[in-house]
Image: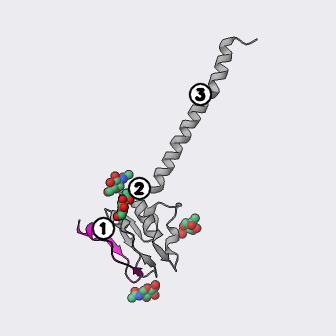
Amino acid sequence: MKSPQAMICLSTSPSISFLFYGLSILCVTSATVSASYGGNETDYLALLSFKSKITQDPYKVLTSWNHSFHFCDWAGISCGKRHKRVTALRLGSQGLEGSLSPHVGNLSFLRELDLGNNSFQGTIPHELALAGSK
Ligand SMILES: *[C@@H]1O[C@H](CO)[C@@H](O)[C@H](O)[C@H]1NC(C)=O
Ligand SMILES: *[C@@H]1O[C@H](CO)[C@@H](O)[C@H](O)[C@H]1NC(C)=O
Ligand SMILES: *[C@@H]1O[C@H](CO)[C@@H](O)[C@H](O)[C@H]1NC(C)=O
Ligand SMILES: *[C@@H]1O[C@H](CO)[C@@H](O)[C@H](O)[C@H]1NC(C)=O
């Protein structure tokens, strides 16, 4: 026959290990989420917004803009080596059509923007002019 103490031990240990299991899942999940924008969520969201305003991408240059890669490895993007912030967006002559997202103005480390020889419609968002004058 088992002693009452052994019974308690048996009944509590599964819930404790379940708690630890739950905690480790939480840690793994938050690490994965922050890795997907690798430091700066603002830059990541700005690039996603830029992509969402593109209506034509004949050479499929924006297909690499997906979750499989850090945004610093997306086509046409350059980042600072150390801080992993977007410093250049070079998508000239790609046959792109669409409008320019004002979120691009949130790329606060952007120094070079080459979107020449594409078909962007609408006005240049004033957020960009502000970013350029900084
Ligand atoms: C991303 O950059 C913005 C603007 O430079 C800053 O306000 C924000 O705190 C940064 N976020 C992270 C997670 O580094
Ligand atoms: C992500 O980009 C790579 C490189 O362009 C491509 O091979 C892959 O199919 C893309 N994945 C998705 C889900 O679009
Ligand atoms: C403009 O882009 C197209 C491709 O979309 C290319 O064939 C053409 O040579 C480019 N023109 C200039 C002047 O760069
Ligand atoms: C980025 O820019 C847009 C439009 O200029 C703005 O609405 C948004 O709040 C900005 N900030 C972030 C963190 O996306």
Q: Where is ligand 3, by quadrant?
A: bottom left
Magenta residues span: 112-134
Which residue position holds label 3? 16
The residue drawn where x is 52% and y is 60% is 67
Mark 3 residue type: Ile
Q: Is residue 17 left or right of residue 64?
A: right
**Mark 1 CB lies closer than 8 A to ligand 4:** yes
Task: Write down the quadrant of residue 79 in the picture.
Answer: bottom left
Which residue position holds label 1? 127
Residue 41 marker: 2
Where residue 121 sits: x, y (%)?
A: 40, 80
Q: CA distance from mark 3 to mark 2?
A: 35 Å
Mark 2 residue type: Glu
The answer to whether marks 2 and 1 mark residues whose Cβ atoms lie closer than 8 Å is no
**Mark 3 CB lies closer than 8 A to ligand 1:** no
10 Å crowding of disc 3: few (<14), some (14-19), many (20+): few
**Mark 2 CB lies closer than 8 A to ligand 1:** yes
Which of disc 1 and disc 2 is earlier in sequence?
Answer: 2
